[in-house]
Amino acid sequence: MAGSTNLKTEGTGLKSGTNGLDVLNAIRNALPSNYANRIPEATKENLASYANALRDFPVIMNKWVNVLINKIGLTVIKNKMWNNKLAEFQRGDLPVGSTIEEIFIDVVKAKTYTEEPEANNLGDVFAVNKPDVKVRFHIVNSQLVYPISISKVNILQAFNNLPAFEDFLSKVFESVYASANLDEYLQTKQLIQFYATNDSINRFVDVEVDAVTDEASAKALATKIRAYSNKLEFMSNKYNYAGVTTHTPKEDQVLLINTDTEALMDVNVLAYAFNMEKADVSAVVNKVVVLDDFGDDTDTATQAILVDRDWFMIYSQLYQMEEQNNALHLYFNRFLHIWKVYSTSEFANAIRFTTTPVENEDSGNTGE
């Protein structure tokens, strides 16, 4: 970033064209007026004066760092983390408590009409017909903290020139959002292996396929995916672990494939898999997420996974910055806490295409 006139704002939450001066003045304007009045409006020519004001008033320096981290940094970090390939499947926030109660009400079984009640039982109209309600619970299971230490000396040195300050901004946040982004991606991928192996139970509905090694085997896999993609549009209890009767329209179907498989399945093959027009490239891409692996780089059997997008149960409970300064060594220490629920829905359709032999294929998989 050094030497640039504009910050790299794509995906950061900052407006396009924002530069270091914009950030400096945004921080100044966010300070209480009695502090802001002691700091000059930043220009390319007066960076030293701006820095001197921070150096001469330690209280202002501390407030300045708080605004930098809490108002700008958190926005940059949070939005940058959406570069995670699997971030789109996060469901939202968990505002209170630490548990999500997922409820599914299964279809009602119809009864045959009779003109008269059996054995003259006139009370049968008052019988209780309870709905078939199934419940699953998902808890907060990831509580991570990311420390950020900013040296007072480094802050003042960053005011040598505008490119130096912009480089400083980049370094302050880059390691944090890169680490958090990677952790979220890895934990989301691990849901795949957890779903297949937790308690030695495979919760996927497995479909046996040949390993994808060439164009012909890629087309064969696409044919299987197409068949099951079509099946998911119909109400059935065969394709989810809980054995509930549900369906997944094509717009809610997500295909997860690894890089090796994707290399042999071009856009036309993927379009065929979803029974689409070959020219409709964007629709195909929106349905396909390419991963480096399925949460375990030793898993060579899994060729692809087709799930309902509601299979992912990922919620954020806490996204908060705390502070504890190191007065002895002149460090401003900040701690970003990110707490999340990483789970999956047993009510959602989830099919795994695997080279592992499968008995009674298409008979369904039920955990009830």
Image (spheres, helix red, strand yellow):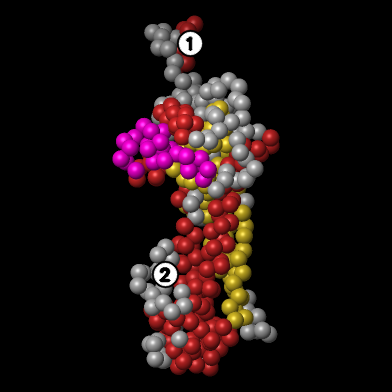
Q: Nearer the viewer, mark 1 or mark 2?
A: 2
Question: Whole-Å distance between the Cαs marked 1 and 2?
Answer: 76 Å
Q: Picture coordinates of residue 114 (x, y %)?
A: 41, 9
Q: Residue at x 30, y 40 (%)?
A: 279
Kindly identify the residue that appears in the image at 61 percent across and 69 percent down: 147
Give the secondary structure at mark 2: loop
Is any atom of residue 67 visible in this view? no
Number of numbered markers: 2
Instruction: Quarter of the image for the C terminus: give it.
Output: top right
Q: Position of residue 68 (x, y in %)?
A: 49, 76
- Place of residue 2 in the rendered image (x, y in percent of width and height, measured from the top left): 46, 78
**Residue 115 x %, y %:** 39, 8
Please state which amino acid type lies under the numbered disc 1. Asn
Nearest the viewer among 268 and 234 is: 268
Label 1, secondary structure: give it: loop
The quadrant where residue 113 appears: top left
Residue at the disc numbered 2: 8
Query: Which residue is at a point 37% across and 38% down the rendered structure image?
Result: 268
Which is more toward the observer, 307 or 266? 266
Q: Which residue is mark 1?
A: 121
Q: Is residue 42 above or below residue 19?
A: below
Whether residue 271 is in magenta: the answer is yes
Residue farthest along the top direction in this orientation? 119
Please state the extent of the stretch shown in magenta in the rendering.
Answer: 252-281
